[in-house]
Amino acid sequence: MTALILGLAVYGWSWAGNELTQRRLTLEVIDAERAAVEQDRMALATDREALQAERKEFDKLIKEKHEANNQQALKLEKDRADMEDAKKQVQDSKTAFDHEKKVLDDEKAKLEAEKQALEAEKAKLAEEKITFEAAKAAFAEDKAAFAEDKTAFEEDKAAFEEAKAAFEGDESKKSRR
């Protein structure tokens, strides 16, 4: 009789130990999933910061280009005004007039070359904008995937809580018997 009681006690202790081990393993899996989700969240935050830094750098480059263009336009306006003054001063001399015309033609060619360079820069900025938009779209997709993962995690957590509650309910029924 004592051996039977002792055997039942050992069996109960072993069963309770296995149950605790199973619960601990389940909690470790949940903790690992939480850590993975947190790492994904941190990676997304890092990507967001990198995109924001790239955006700031891109905005800075655009601002610098605009300022350079404005300075160039002011310089060209000043050059044009200076040429007009020179043209008025030497208007009576055909040689001076021809020289002035040549200078204006040279400046026009220079402006056309600069215009072409600005158009090339504009095309480059458009390509960079497309790249930025693609990165932004990829970030939005990553964000949506993260939201889906989070939803799936919440559903798994809810299912686990239900299973835990059902298990605890079964345990309480067993303990009443």
Image (spheres, rainbow, N blue to C red):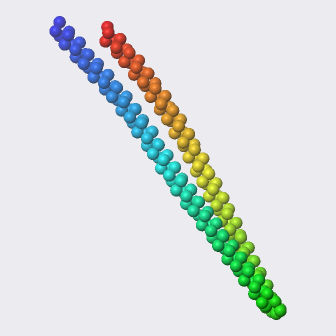
Q: The N terminus is located in which quarter?
A: top left
* Left or right: residue 42 compared with residue 120: left
* Left or right: residue 12 compared with residue 166: left
Is residue 4 in view from this perspective?
yes
- Residue in the foreground of this view, choosing between 62 and 157: 62
Query: In which quadrant of the rendered view does residue 166 lie?
Result: top left
Image position, residue 31 (x, y; %): 38, 34
Question: As displayed, is residue 4 above or below residue 22?
Answer: above
Residue at the farthest top position: 1
How many numbered markers are drawn? 0
Residue at the location (29% across, 19% down)?
15
Residue at the location (54% across, 53% down)?
51
Is residue 102 in view from this perspective?
no
Q: The C terminus is located in which quarter?
A: top left
Query: In which quadrant of the rendered view does residue 129 lie?
Result: bottom right
Image position, residue 114 (x, y; %): 69, 73
Question: As displayed, is residue 166 above or below residue 90?
Answer: above
Residue at the location (20% across, 10% down)?
5
Residue at the location (64% across, 54% down)?
130
Image position, residue 66 (x, y; %): 64, 66
* Left or right: residue 138 compared with residue 34: right
